[in-house]
Image (cartoon, rainbow, N blue to C red):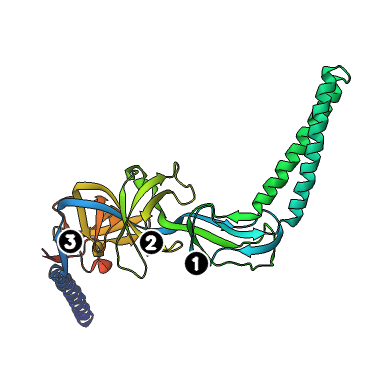
Amino acid sequence: MKLKNLVLVLLAIIIVGFITFRIFANKEKNAAAKNFKGNKTAMQVSGVVVKSSTFNNTLSLSGSIEANEQVEIRSEVSGIVEGIYFSEGTFVKKGQVLFKVNDIELKAQLQQAVTKEGLAGENARRAKLLLQKEAISQEEYDVANADFASTKAQTQLVRAQIAKTAVKAPFSGKIGLRSISPGTYITPAILVAKLVNTNQLKITFSVPEKYATQVKNKTVVNFTVSGSSANHTAIIYAIEPEVEVATRTLQIRAIAENQQGKLFPGTFAEVHLPLATITDAIVVPSEAIIPVQGGKKVFISNNGKAKEVMVDAATRTESDILILSGLNVGDTLITSGVMTLKNETPVKVQIKN
């Protein structure tokens, strides 16, 4: 009986000791974890203090260069080409004959029409005399007079067709490569050549609808073309009266001088469109911006920890971007390591000037 009591006492002492040990072990583990969290190293990042400044708001847009005037040269009548009076790639003047279509048949038709016109005219003259003598009715006179008018119109029609056999330049410009030769049977469907006026060029480009109210006529824009670093200027002269629904953009057209012929229609242009100058703008480095679904975000330092902020960004330059909302003057904006940051991450910011 004494042995059994002794075993129970020893067992109770062992259980109490084990429980006491576990309590102290858990306390030490929690203290160590707390101590570890408290001593966690802050992430080293770079940043800038947000300031306001004057910003010349300029949009960079893609445009297309077109000839001021251009037309496809075609014949309005069918026939054999009897003469070509221009050289490919040369300058032609307005009204210059470019090529001639054979008009022998039309001239024969004209002779026939002139003869009929003369006869009908004589009949109308006689009918008038007879009407005055009351030898014929008013109806007979009207028929003779209508016949004369009809033959006269037929003569004018044939003359017009003969005039169309000599195709002339509608304006002065440079003519391109021809697709016909003397003796070619030509129809209105055949493209002979293209005529373009490149002394002035049109630059067509589109701006996002949110900038539509800031675009004005007679605004001077700068543009460059691929393969050249030369800067050219153009003046806005036409603005589309409505925003295109499919792209939500407004189409703009400017005109540029090209007297030296260094610019070519059909090439792309990088257009720099000046908008309103903002005097108290917030401009931040582009590397601080993180694109996310539904917008853009940045991180600022708040009490030693990273804080995520959604921003509304606008115009972008080579190194900076204009912020419309989301940031305030005096905020410490984090500019490095932003892709690995999360909310509440401890940070130590090194401010850059």
Is there any visible trace of residue 147 in the rendered image? no
Query: Between residues 284 and 213, which one lies in front from this camera angle?
Result: 213
Q: Residue at x 32, y 44 (%)?
A: 214
Q: Position of residue 91 (x, y in %)?
A: 47, 61
The mark found on residue 286 in the picture is: none
Q: Which residue is mark 2?
A: 269
Q: Nearer the viewer, mark 1 or mark 2?
A: 1
Rendering coords of residue 343 (x, y %): 24, 61
Q: What's the residue type where badge 3 is placed?
A: Lys
Q: Which residue is mark 1?
A: 89
Cα separation between marks 3 and 1: 69 Å
Tell me if 324 is positioned left or right of 30 in this view: right
Mark 1: few, some, or many residues within 10 Å (few <14, many ≥20)? some
First of labels 3, 2 by sequence position: 2
Q: Nearer the viewer, residue 149 or 202?
A: 149
Above or below, 314 relative to 86:
above
Residue located 36% across and 70% down the image: 227
Q: Quadrant of the N terminus?
A: bottom left
Asked if 11 appears above or below 232 in the picture, the reply is below
**Comparing labels 3 and 1, the label whose residue is closer to the camera:** 1
Which amino acid, by three-letter code, is at mark 2? Ala
Q: Where is residue 307 drawn, in percent x and y? A: 22, 58
Foreground tag (3 vs 2): 2
Q: Amino acid at mark 1?
A: Gly
| Contact, mark 3 vs mark 2 (Cβ under 8 Å) | no
Q: Residue under label 3, please give it.
A: 305
**Residue 326 appears left or right of 65:** left
For numbered disc 1, what is the local secondary structure? Answer: loop
